[in-house]
Image (cartoon, rainbow, N blue to C red):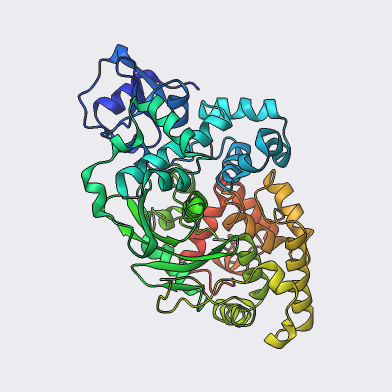
Amino acid sequence: MDLDVDACYRAFRTRDPRFDGRLFGAVRTTRVYCRPICPAPMPKRENLTFYATAAAAQEAGFRPCLRCRPETAPEFAAWRGTSNTVSRALALIDRGALDEGGIDRLAERLGVGERQLRRLFRQHLGASPVSVAQTRRVLLAKQLIHETPLPMAEVALASGFGSIRRFNEIFQRLFARPPCALRRATATASSRQNGEVTIVLGYRPPFDWATMVAFLKARAIPGVEVVSNARYARTIEIDGAHGIVAVEPASGHALRIVIRFSRLSALPTIIARVRRVFDLTADPQAVNAQLAEDPILAPLVAARPGLRVPGAWDGFELAVRAVLGQQITVAAGVGLVAKLVTRCGPALAGSGLNTEGLTHVFPRPEHVASADLMALGMPRRRAATLASLAAAVVADPHVLGAGRTLTECVAQLRALPGIGEWTAQYIAMRELREPDAFPAGDIGLLRALTDSEGKRLTSGELLARAERWRPWRAYAAQHLWASGTSGRRTN
């Protein structure tokens, strides 16, 4: 990867927080890599090598700094807008794609060759897919060592290592000491009471928490989600096990995540989903610079510079919400989903999970496929659509997962029963995290913009107007929805 060494050095010399997460500096004399905001004395320029990602620095043989803790830097999606293949590959890696089938299978799901995938990772991230996955495991393990009192065996399991022996070997090689030697006495202050694990996830400021939770609160499913101005909590189900996750603002540019789940091995999956729901890898500076060039969006961007695109916890859950919310208001759609949860969703099970307002987990596809949906009071055609959608997800669990290009993803989604263009783009925006997804047929967006004569735009005219917003059309849509000028919005 090509980096401007002079600019990188200036960022480190001035400890510029704008480059935190974008850039890492590796000191050749100490074999340590740091964040730009590291409080350690500034190394000599000739001793510094710069990398765009922690994975690249680690693959080059450097170890993470114990002072600035690279694992707490905001994860920055530097590849967004330049390589959607890399973005989708990382999403699949977060969901365990490399554990399921290796690089060959990952490349096949992305529709590229293995060599091309390796080349793209090297070009945009400076490291191989395997190195990226291993770096993420190491940094998560280091964060758990610093921030929780989990025993080392549980840290290894929770961070995705296949064995304690492998965990110990990697840490001994990186830090020349066993993992337990990295633990500080303060870690015991964050005790794991009632099976809780608390971690902090950073983001690049600004972050519009108020708009984010307002969006989630309006769509909160009774019994599954409880949302206040200061906290988002929901039930979760992974491989039959139930739990709870709660998210709230933390000091600094971070969110505090409290996880209560019996299977620690699911922790990387849970963290990845939290990042997806709260769009923690967004780069507001890049998005705002592009959208503010449009005179209509400029005041909206100025009013909400930290706006993010809320993600979805689960693809099937989002698809069900979208189908049930078609052509009705948000409140009416939530009411139908609540009936579905009451009828098909298992009651929250597990010791210590009795939390006020959280009573059920969202039903799995097989529960919906076999249920009598007509009893929910919905039209026969919509009930049939929902049953067919559930059956399709049962037959192929990856059908709502990250795929290839945005066009191919939308085409694949539209092949599912009851999924039209609007719903497919909406799923691509919130579940697949496609920053350029754009539901041009949305009535709210069409109401928000008019032509020079004051007439409402057609969907075709809106698409033409949105060309200047690429590759951030999803953020443009979110600005228009959040502005309050776009009327009521479904789903």
Q: How many marks?
A: 0
Relative placement, left or right, of 467 versus 198 is: right
Q: Position of residue 133 (x, y in %)?
A: 53, 36
Residue 169 vs residue 403, the one in the foreground: 169
| Image location (x, y in percent) of residue 382 | 75, 77
Query: Residue 115: x, y in percent?
Result: 68, 25
Residue at left 79%, top 76%?
384
Q: Is residue 195 visible?
A: yes
Residue drawn where x is 43% and y is 36% of the image: 138
Q: Tell me where residue 182 appears, x and y as whole percent.
A: 29, 36
User: Residue 241 appears in which quarter of the rendering?
Assistant: bottom right
Where residue 98 sits, quadrant-wise, is top right
Q: Is residue 294 toward the left or the right of residue 114 in the image? A: left
Q: Is residue 439 visible?
A: no
> What's the residue at 66%, 34% (across, down)?
103
User: Is residue 335 positioned above or below 307 on the image?
Assistant: below
Quadrant containing the C terminus is bottom right
327, 86: nearer the viewer: 86
Q: Measured along the vertical axis of the image, is residue 48 above or below residue 316?
A: above
Viewer-proximal residue, 380 or 473? 380
Q: Is residue 437 left or right of residue 23?
A: right
Taking the image as shown, residue 11 lies to the left or right of residue 98, namely left
